[in-house]
Amino acid sequence: MLLLALLLLLPLLAAARLLWGQWMLRTLHLPPLAPGFLHLLQPNLPIHLLGLTQKLGPVYRVRLGLQEVVVLNSKKTIEEAMVKKWVDFAGRPQTPSFKMVSQNNQDLSVGDYSPLWKAHKKLIRSALLLSMRNSMEPLVQELTLEFCERMQAQAGAPLAIHKEFSLLTCTIICYLTFGNKEDSMVRAFHDCIQDLLSTWHHWSILILDIVPFLRFFPNPVLWKLKRIIKRRDHMVKEQLRQHKDSLVVGQWRDMTDYMLQEMKKQRVEGGAGQLLEGHVHMAMVDLFIGGTDTIASTLSWAVAFLLHHPEIQWRLQEELDRELGPRVPNSWVQYKDRTRLPLLNATIAEVLRLRSSVPLALPHRTTRPSSILGYDIPEGMTIIPNLLGAHLDDAIWEQPHEFRPERFLEPGAPSRALAFGCGARVCVGEPLARLEIFVVLAQLLRAFTLLPAAGHPPSLQPLDKQSTSLWMQPFEVLLQPRTPVPRA
Ligand code: HEM
Ligand SMILES: *[C@@H]1O[C@H](CO)[C@@H](O)[C@H](O)[C@H]1NC(C)=O
């Protein structure tokens, strides 16, 4: 009986809140509201949201479930919010699923904006850039060479390359974070993060963010998610314990050593709390989640586009041979050489534009009342930057759906796209991601010619199950060795 009453009461309360909110908003000059309730069911949400700009302009409101959100669909409006008015737009909505995966809100990527959050971001950024300044590139180079050697052993047979990229990027982040690249550990973390992401993105979890009272119903997927989080936290805690046991003060072997020692030194503005071990814990989780499939997926898309455009692949190989000379086994393609490899650099920019692996970024939340393009944006509003939409805006990009790296080499070309977001919430992993994508593609194209495995290139349509990430449909590639490498 009580349950029934509760079930009836909760939707009523939700509806009352909604009406009250609507009435309050009526006094403001809000962006136009898109008709309809079912936008979330659109298979390709970023493209659908871009389509709505035809009638409504680049900024509009749309209903996602019970809440209204503001969508920004152009580079200009995204930069106005995230760069020019960054403090106003630096928050994150605190949804039930965000809270569940983030251990008492000690997370960076889904954490709300606060002085403590700022200190946390600074810690992670300096862990990546400062503590790894001299070791990041050698590490990426060495692991990429090992990767190419493994690929050499499988050359000539159809290869599901996404899985290989995913293990490589996970190995790199494991080594940077924990100073360990043992196969069993990398696989354990890799599988755990894959499970976590696929469960988290399951509709029966996503719906809890939209219709929160559904969490009072039995939900086996939710139980599974909680089990995976437990497993994740157990693995991370074990690493923390090992690092604390063998720590030498004043020295760091990896990012964990660095963060454990530096967390206490970070000054938090206004004395608002202090960074704790939980923040280091969640930093590791963020690094693994952010640093594995995003990069692997960009690399897979790059391979797919090159399979569709053999002439560009040929020109890239020609550029590498011309600038770097014939390939010597085990030699690096240094990151600083990218200035001599403009076509490769432009190709990467083009892949990031057309298949930004986080096409709708992460949702932002306004920390105080603000405005965009003259429209009022109330405090506490969820904001969705449609990065992919901005990348396909035909007011800026000529024939935006075409894969044409040369567009970045032409005079007056638009500057690079916004695949990593911008402003206070910009991706902390951008420098690492750019380094990895460059080194892996350069080494791969030096060592192999990429050929379609089934006689035809893979589909360029994203898997539309998940419109919040642009994953590829599974595909295989043939790697044909370019220069015979002497066998050891
Ligand atoms: C091609 C690769 C990648 C792409 C396209 C990408 C894209 C993005 C985007 C669009 C955001 C959200 C920005 C916003 O909220 O406005 C983001 C946030 C983030 N990314 Fe990445 N990312 C990539 C790789 C990485 C890597 C390698 C790491 C870690 C090593 C990483 C860690 C993070 C973290 C921690 C955040 C949250 C930042 C915050 O909330 O302030 N990402 N990324
Ligand atoms: C690589 O290409 C992007 C996009 O055109 C450009 O902004 C950047 O300056 C280029 N970098 C180098 C090193 O040429």
Image: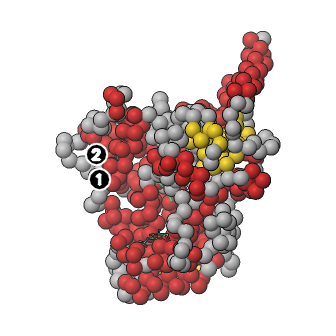
Tell which of 63 and 443 is nearer to you: 63
Looking at the rendered structure, the secondary structure element under dot 1 is loop
Query: What residue sits 62% from the left and 73% below the top?
Result: 403
Above or below residue 125? Residue 69 is above
Q: Is residue 226 visible?
A: no
427 vs 466, left or right, is: left
Q: Position of residue 382 (x, y in %)?
A: 61, 38
Quarter of the picture containing the C terminus is bottom left
Q: Which mark is residue 130?
A: 1
Report the number of discs. Answer: 2
Q: Which residue is at a point 34% across and 39% down the rendered structure image?
A: 240
Q: Which image quadrant for residue 114?
A: top left
Rendered residue at 74%/11% (across/down): 2
Q: Which residue is mark 2?
A: 258
State the residue lying farthest toward the right.
36
Query: Where in the figure is residue 129, as x and y percent of width and height?
Result: 33, 54
Q: What's the amino acid at mark 2?
A: Tyr
Question: Which percent across, then down, holds residue 427?
Answer: 47, 51
User: Which label's residue is closer to the chain start, 2 or 1?
Assistant: 1
Q: Nearer the viewer, residue 329 or 378?
A: 378
The 10 Å Cα crowd at callout 1, few under 14, some 14 to 19, many 20 or more, is some
